[in-house]
Amino acid sequence: MRPQDIIRHKRDGGELSREEIASFVQGVVGGEWADYQASALLMAVYLNGMTTAEMEALTQAMLHSGEILDLSHINAPEADKHSTGGVGDKTSLVIAPLAAAAGVCVPMISGRGLGHTGGTLDKLEAIPGYRVGLSLREFEDVLQRVGFAMMGQTAEIAPADKKLYALRDATETVESIPLIVASIMSKKLAAGLGALVLDVKTGSGAFMHDEGRARALARALVRTGNSCGVKTEALLTDMSQPLGVAVGNAFEVRECLDIMRGEVTDGTRPVRDLSVELAARMVALSGVADSLEAARADVVRALEGGAALERFRSNVEAQGGDPRVCDDPGKLEDWTLEEVKVESVRAGFVTAVDAAEVGRAVASVGGGRVRIEDRIDPAVGFLARAKIGDELKAGEALGLLYCRGESGAVEAAARIRAAYTVRDEPPMRVPELIKEVIAQ
């Protein structure tokens, strides 16, 4: 099939056949489609959308563009979790060992942070020596020994997605729901899963600010996963403020270790509660527990009894990291950083937070990347003290910013200060952490 014919068909609002979609994906991977032709089709999809059948066909074609892991030799059901990303979203580091301790095999293929959001791989690399660049054989070995493994996308896993994502980023077509669904699901399903739980975020710190669009994305993801034979559920969750306290890679790892060590505060409780709920749904969907209630009990027992922390310790050791951080999370801190108190300019109630701007401020002092090749300083970050609904005095801390020297600190602190809206009257409502469960 000629690329021009497929492009014209979609440009004119037609529904692409499974054969046309397969020809497109094969052409991208094999180099028969030029970048400008692939970009033209992506824009046509962005403008005209896709039917459910098209979206499922695209997901399947991208999934089968590379290897699909066969984990049948591991004597445990496979399940994973995926988040659409946000500021301070660190739950994967708690969920994977929790689910593994409860009897689920968790092959987690994760990504890096870009823009205002953090990435699981960047957080893990804040642990001295931790390796995320595993071969597929190493990945399977860690899974067999520990019960969960965490690595980045390899050249063998959904290679079409790697190429198409770069083109989407360059052509401003990232926000298309069909393209998001195919990108996420092709990578996740390549891990040979039997169950998948999705955390679709909405609010000021999410990619989908609008709750209606986030709900549509969640439904599309669930529908596609189930159509591919993977039991799939989604939670629509709040990202109207940073999740938990820590924003910044080493600080976020420490927060997760504190939670697994039983050291939970009011500020970190949302991370703990969301991690438990997502892990419990993984356990229930996998059939390890008879009900969601039983799964929650198993997960809480693994957390409070220390089994999750021991799984995490085993994984860190297996992937080359320093397991001593599990006993002394303070080893992750850099005492040479400058601490800057970010103060509220007035008394009142916190009524809103521009969470994305908080994330961008941390990125500006080295905690994130604008381009994928940018280097990250894992030690810098922000510890949020004020939450929506809190009453503050003038000069009271919104949080503490940690950075290297004074370069950029004043500007970053000002950006964080401006991200918090403080009014005389309390907010009409405090956002719920979990807004909705979508199972079909």
Image: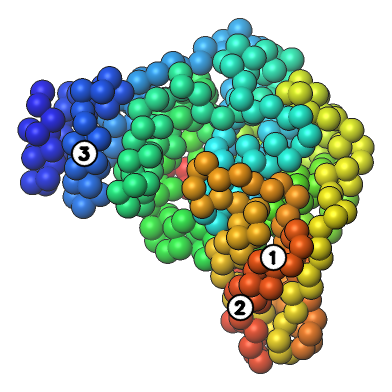
Using the rendered view, name the quadrant where residue 340 is placed. bottom right
**Residue 373 versus residue 212 in the image, above or below:** above
Q: Is residue 431 left or right of residue 31?
A: right
- Which residue shows up at 60% across the image and 51% down it? 368
Tag 2: amino acid: Ala
Residue placed under numbered mark 1 in the picture: 407
| Residue lying at 80% horizontally and 81% vertically, measured from the top left | 396
Image spot of residue 108 (x, y percent): 60, 29
Q: Is residue 299 visible?
A: no
Q: Position of residue 361 (x, y in %)?
A: 61, 64
What residue is shown at x 69% (from left), y 65% (from top)?
A: 407
Q: In whole angstroms, how far apart are the C-alphas of marks 2 and 3?
A: 40 Å
Looking at the picture, tell me which residue is in the foreground, 233 or 204.
204
Disc 1 to disc 3, C-alpha distance: 41 Å
Q: Quadrant of the C terminus?
A: top left
Which residue is disc 3 drawn over? 36
Q: Can you tell which quarter of the image residue 336 is in?
A: bottom right
Camera-nearest label, 1 or 2: 1
Counting residues from the N terminus, which is met first, the one under dot 2 or under dot 3?
3
Mark 2 or mark 1, which is nearer the start of the sequence? 1
Residue 319 percent across, percent down from the top left: 73, 23
